[in-house]
Image (tube, rainbow, N blue to C red):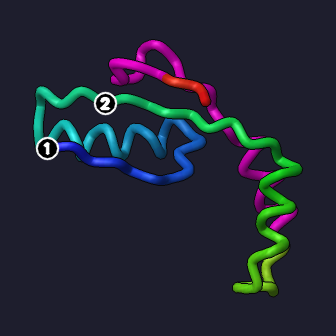
Amino acid sequence: MDVILDETNLTRKGRNKWITIAKEVNPDIEIIFIEISTSIEECKARRKTDTKDTDTDWDAVITSMAANKNEVTEDEDFVSHIKV
């Protein structure tokens, strides 16, 4: 079975949640992390084109998320880490 999880997963804690769930379902699972590097400026520009939830300060949210990002490390349970 192949599963794709499309999620931000910027923090180790957030990634670990999904790794734990996957390993509970299948202890032999192989997990590949695909990192799509989009600049903060691009994220903010894309968000401005979205007309939903205009009451939120999305520039502040995106800036905060970027500031709290944890780089993927070798000791996380990924068989591969691909940067796009």
Position of residue 54 measured from the top left corner of the image (x, y, whole percent): 80, 85
Residue 27 location, quadrant: top left
Q: Is residue 68 left or right of residue 84?
A: right
Rendering coords of residue 31 (x, y %): 31, 30
- Mark 1 and mark 2: span between their CA atoms? 12 Å
| Residue at image mark 1 | 1
Q: Residue at x 57, y 40 (%)?
A: 11
Amino acid under label 1? Met
Residue 6 magenta:
no
59 drawn magenta: yes
Query: Image check: 42 left or right of 70?
Result: right
* Location of mark 2 (residue): 31
Q: Nearer the viewer, residue 52 or 14?
A: 52
Name the residue located 36 percent from the left edge and 23 percent from the top edge.
78
Q: Amino acid at mark 2?
A: Ile
Nearest to the observer: residue 36 or residue 26: 36
Total marks shown come to 2
Q: Are marks 1 and 2 in contact (CB under 8 Å)?
A: no
Q: Position of residue 1 (x, y in %)?
A: 14, 44
Q: Which residues make up the magenta segment? A: 58-81
Q: Specify the farthest residue to the top.
A: 74
Could you say where residue 6 lies in the image, as x and y percent from the top left? 45, 53
Earlier along the polypeptide chain: callout 1 or callout 2? 1
- Determine crowd level at label 2: few under 14, some 14-19, many 20+ residues with C-alpha closer than 10 A: some
Q: Is residue 65 above or below residue 52?
A: above
